[in-house]
């Protein structure tokens, strides 16, 4: 994730297909959304994949909604395909705020067609999407909202590394009493660097630029976890933007040049360096 002045890039390029080994995820579009209508004919899908009232009453409108959400990158919605080319399920990820940490997280939901259950598709799809989210976005947590009587989903969650909070506190949704008691399960990318990076991004969003700079410096002091997007180069790039927002232009210039020296160069860095050259005289 690259910070721009007054803006944080929302997402990397979203691939049309994510390979999950036993299956693959394909973005929902107008040509494959029919499968979701078919999936929501089943009572247990309608029960456990909780929709808002207007979408539950009109699944076709829900399908159009998620097609639009994919196009606008407001959320990620995929059809799960078997390796034989069959549509077997649906999985989605929507950004939301974690009220406990006041940080953004992913809310993931999925459903598998009854004729394709107990074949490992749910676990493969959940692991594949979760790995993609944690490795390509700065959100620290992925959350599953699971009904207490949905034993199959609890088993999938455990298999994919999700855990319940220590207090095991559940909640009852008065708008959806049919679902019963629900629990939130979480998974996060391990490592202190991830934590500090997310703190820095949050501070930047709140225009707390000095705090963002300190959090980025703390992130640099933590070991890098291979396969994650939180490289030294990315941190120097983002820190340079925050420093520029503080009008600490010389430090910003050196941070951005450091990012370039580490192999990261993008239009945001080039634009900021050009601004520093034309307005501050830094070369």
Image (cartoon, grey):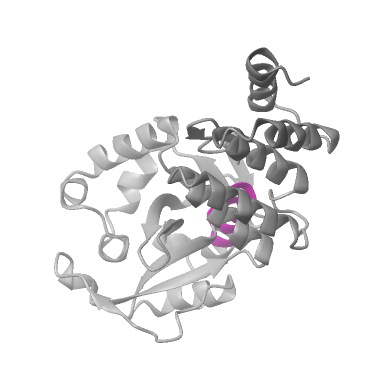
Provide residue 177's location: percent of width, then percent of height: 16, 72
Q: Image check: 66 left or right of 162?
A: left
Residue at 54 percent across and 59 percent down: it is 140
Percent position (x, y) of residue 253?
72, 30
The answer to which image quadrant residue 50 occupies is bottom left
Q: Main secondary structure of the magenta part?
A: helix
Where is residue 282? Give x, y as percent.
74, 21
Quadrant housing residue 251: top right
| Residue 23 included in the magenta stretch of the image | no
Quarter containing the C terminus: top right
Decide if residue 101 is on the left or right side of residue 248.
left
> Of residues 152 and 243, which is closer to you in this image?
243
Location of residue 240 in the rendering, given as x and y in whole percent from the top left corner:
66, 37
Residue bounds of the magenta highlight: 126-139
In the displayed structure, would residue 129 be above or below residue 249?
Answer: below
Q: Nearer the viewer, residue 66 or 84?
A: 66
Residue at point 66% right, 66% down?
192
Q: Nearer the viewer, residue 214 or 96?
A: 214
- Identify the image quadrant of residue 126: bottom right
Say whether residue 115 is visible.
yes
Position of 189 relative to 258 (above/below): below
- Is residue 131 on the magenta stretch? yes
Instruction: Write the residue at 19% across / 43% down.
Output: 58
Q: For this view, does 74 lie left or right of residue 172?
A: right
Q: Which is nearer the eye, 188 or 248?
A: 248
């Amino acid at each position: 994730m690259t910070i721009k002045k007054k803006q944080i890039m929302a997402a990397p390029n979203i691939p049309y297909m994510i390979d999950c080994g036993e299956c693959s995820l394909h973005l929902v579009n107008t040509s494959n959304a029919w499968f979701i209508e078919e999936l929501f004919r089943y009572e247990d899908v309608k029960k456990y994949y909780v929709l808002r009232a207007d979408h539950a009453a009109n699944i076709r409108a829900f399908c159009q909604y998620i097609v639009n959400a994919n196009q606008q990158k407001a959320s990620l919605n995929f059809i799960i395909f078997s390796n034989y080319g069959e549509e077997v399920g649906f999985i989605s990820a929507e950004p939301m705020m974690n009220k406990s940490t006041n940080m953004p997280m992913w809310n993931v939901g999925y459903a598998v067609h009854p004729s394709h259950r107990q074949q490992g598709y749910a676990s493969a799809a959940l692991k594949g999407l979760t790995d993609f989210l944690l490795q390509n976005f700065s959100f620290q947590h992925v959350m599953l909202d699971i009904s207490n009587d949905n034993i199959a989903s609890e088993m999938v969650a455990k298999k994919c590394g999700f855990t319940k909070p220590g207090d095991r506190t559940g909640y009852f949704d008065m708008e959806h009493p049919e679902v019963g008691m629900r629990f939130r399960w979480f998974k996060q990318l391990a490592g202190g660097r991830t934590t500090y990076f997310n703190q820095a991004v949050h501070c930047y969003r709140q225009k707390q630029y000095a705090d963002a700079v300190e959090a980025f410096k703390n992130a640099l002091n933590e070991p890098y976890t291979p396969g994650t997007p939180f490289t030294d180069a990315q941190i120097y790039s983002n820190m340079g933007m925050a420093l520029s927002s503080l009008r600490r232009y010389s430090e910003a210039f050196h941070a951005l040049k450091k990012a370039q020296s580490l192999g990261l160069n993008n239009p945001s860095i080039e634009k900021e360096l050009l601004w520093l050259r034309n307005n501050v005289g830094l070369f």
